[in-house]
Image (tube, helix red, strand yellow):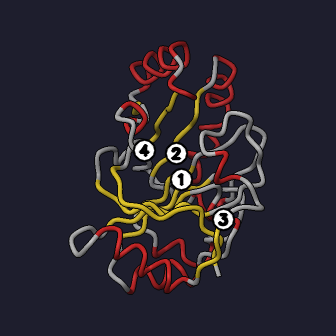
Amino acid sequence: MYKVNDVYYSIQGEGYHTGLPVVVVRLQGCSLGCHWCDTPEAASQEDGQQFSASQVVLMARAAAGPVIRDILLTGGEPTEQDLTDLVGQLCIAGFRVHLETNGTDSGADFVIGSIHWLTISPKQGHSVLLSYLRRASELKFIVIDRTTLDWIDKQLPIFLDYAPDDVVVSLQPEGRGHHATELCIAKCKETGWRLSVQVHKYLQIA
């Protein structure tokens, strides 16, 4: 059984696949407790509803209809639950599975090769598992201020030693704040990294 916050059909609003129609499966619970978390309702360990993997697949099919085959597992922190059964059933159902994770928990270790797109969003002060780094499609950093950029400059070379050569690096300003956005734009222009701007919030969609 999986603790689920919500299942819905939307447009991917951030990261490399911005603009892509996806079914979002937002799993419940995250233990990191980031004070700037933009989905605190999904971080609580007490909330959410229990569903089996097959029930989640049925909800995903009902949400998207017959055309859409991209599905995003997010949270909360999805890998705090063992994703083996869920990812397996989603793949059998024909979905291309996208996973966004902070990379600190091993709940996707056994199915990482079945995931179509793996976005790791590292959090300062927390280690990322090497098994995830080796299969990362995208490293997406949330930028709060100059201190965050200094941390990224120190940490990213270590991540890149293990990540695939074609991994995408994205910077995303926390809360769409003006100062953080300016910092991200300048850094992306300097480095060639991508800017992620949470388009879904500008459009006021989920």
For label 3, the residue is 48
Asked whether the beta carbons under mark 4 and mark 1 sit within 8 Å of each other, the answer is no
For label 1, the residue is 163
| Residue 127 placement (x, y as % from top left) | 74, 49
Disc 1 versus disc 2: distance between alpha carbons?
Answer: 9 Å
Q: Nearer the viewer, mark 3 or mark 2?
A: 3
Disc 3 versus disc 1: distance between alpha carbons?
Answer: 33 Å
Does 71 sit left or right of 126 as displayed? left
**Numbered disc total:** 4
Classify mark 3: helix, strand or loop. loop
| Residue 32 placement (x, y as % from top left) | 76, 48
Q: Nearer the viewer, residue 162 or 91?
A: 91
| Residue 179 placement (x, y as % from top left) | 54, 13
Disc 3 versus disc 2: distance between alpha carbons?
Answer: 28 Å
Disc 4 versus disc 3: distance between alpha carbons?
Answer: 32 Å
Disc 4 marks a residue whose amino acid type is: Val
Disc 2 versus disc 4: distance between alpha carbons?
Answer: 6 Å
Name the N-terminal-most of marks 2 and 4: 2
Q: Nearer the viewer, mark 4 or mark 1?
A: 4
Asked whether the beta carbons under mark 2 and mark 4 sit within 8 Å of each other, the answer is yes
Disc 3 marks a residue whose amino acid type is: Gly
Q: Which mark is residue 168?
A: 4
Name the N-terminal-most of marks 4 and 3: 3
| Residue 187 placement (x, y as % from top left) | 48, 20
Asked whether the beta carbons under mark 1 and mark 2 sit within 8 Å of each other, the answer is yes
The residue carrying pointer 1 sits among few (fewer than 14), some (14 to 19) or many (20 or more) residues within 10 Å by Cα, namely many
Q: Quadrant of residue 104?
A: bottom right
For label 2, the residue is 139
Asked whether the beta carbons under mark 3 and mark 1 sit within 8 Å of each other, the answer is no
Q: Nearer the viewer, residue 146 or 179?
A: 179
Asked whether the beta carbons under mark 3 and mark 2 sit within 8 Å of each other, the answer is no
